[in-house]
Image (cartoon, rainbow, N blue to C red):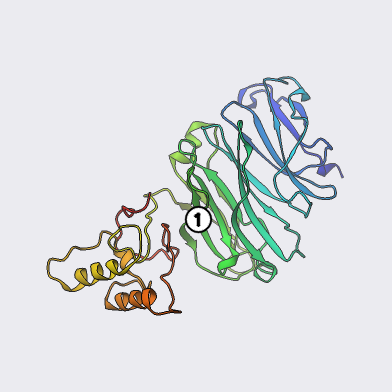
Amino acid sequence: PSSWVEHLLRSDQPYAADDSFTDLGAFSPSASAQNTRLAVDGSGRIHCSFYRNIPPGLYEHRIYDPTIGPTGPSGWQLDTFVIGDTTGSNDYFGWLSSDALGSVHCAYVVNAASGSPLWSFRYRKWDEINGWSDETSLFDATSDQFTGIASYKIFNIGCDETSGTVHAVYRDLANEGALVLARKLATSPEFEFVEQLQPTTLGQHAYIYPTIRGTLYPAFNNTSFGLDITYQHRENPGVPPYSLIYHDASAGSVIRFIRGDGNEDGSFNVADIVFGLNALFVPGGVSPNCVESCDINDDASFNIADMVYGLNALFVPGSTPPDAPYPTCGADPLGNTLDCPTTSAACP
């Protein structure tokens, strides 16, 4: 079908002032392309990701360089790069975002067929020197976590153009369907939880089609000017009306700490228990900088029960360790509200 063929068009005048466009050719070398996404890197090259809708069904990347082919298809990269599963498994969908440092970021879903036993949502980064990075996992969902609950169009990414930090919003099917925000610093190998935007629910298509504002051009639309998120909320599955929700996630910075590390030395040990007991019971004792780090049992309060929990975790075999973020730095997955004004001194 002709709908499987998508082309890159360029306006003949800035802002398409004369409504005239030049056809620069098909995204795919075989012409078959769906769900195409575009991003422009710092050198003006146009990055295209698309699902090639012919067997085996791959999600691919191709570049158009306008400095090589300003008037036609000569600027197309000859080969494509398979972003997702190279064995072919219906990798239907993904997103692109570019920063001002020369990198292009891609989030995509692998094996998104309805009969798949596992949907795998992943991330890669491209730069001119190294090409595409290895894959980083965003999250996975088993068939019992998505069947009758969600489609694969439940994620998106945007990046801070100046720092290269990548923000990801997605419905976390692996954790009872909450809508969450995560981020990946330019220097970090993994994504870390930032905040929960909407509560857990197994309602069908409860949170779907999220978007994050942020493109390289125009400059005032960059995520560094604000992290703006929208998504569709379906309170009653399959029953209109549906709501388009806006969320400003740019206020403040992400507070990172290690649960149990009350004295902020980068580890959880008996010294933290002594620190906590002093803070609780010794007049004039040093108060913790981040009270949330002292909430070892993660019940949204700091008291003697946390010290008992901590001693058990340290010395009683088989006891439950502290909840996340532990044993490394991170944000609180539950978003509890105990005082924690700044990131722990032990966290970079």
Q: Quickly name the residue at label 1.
A: 181
Q: Choose top left, top right, bottom left or bottom right for residue 66.
A: top right
Label 1: few (<14), some (14–19) or many (≥20) C-alpha neighbours in 10 Å: many
Q: Is residue 2 visible?
A: yes
Q: Is residue 19 visible?
A: no
Q: Residue at x 58, y 60 (%)?
A: 171
Q: Amino acid at mark 1?
A: Leu
Q: Residue at x 26, y 59 (%)?
A: 289
The vertical placement of 139 against 238, above or below, is above
The vertical placement of 225 against 254, above or below, is above
Q: Position of residue 287 (x, y in %)?
A: 21, 63
Q: Position of residue 115 (x, y in %)?
A: 77, 65
Q: Is residue 268 left or right of residue 187?
A: left
Q: Nearer the viewer, residue 196 or 343?
A: 343
Q: Nearer the viewer, residue 7 or 327?
A: 327
Q: Is residue 50 left or right of residue 259?
A: right
Find the residue positioned furthest to the right: 1
Q: Is residue 139 left or right of residue 323?
A: right
Secondary-structure class at tag 1: strand
Quadrant location of the N terminus? top right
Q: Is residue 57 left or right of residue 267?
A: right
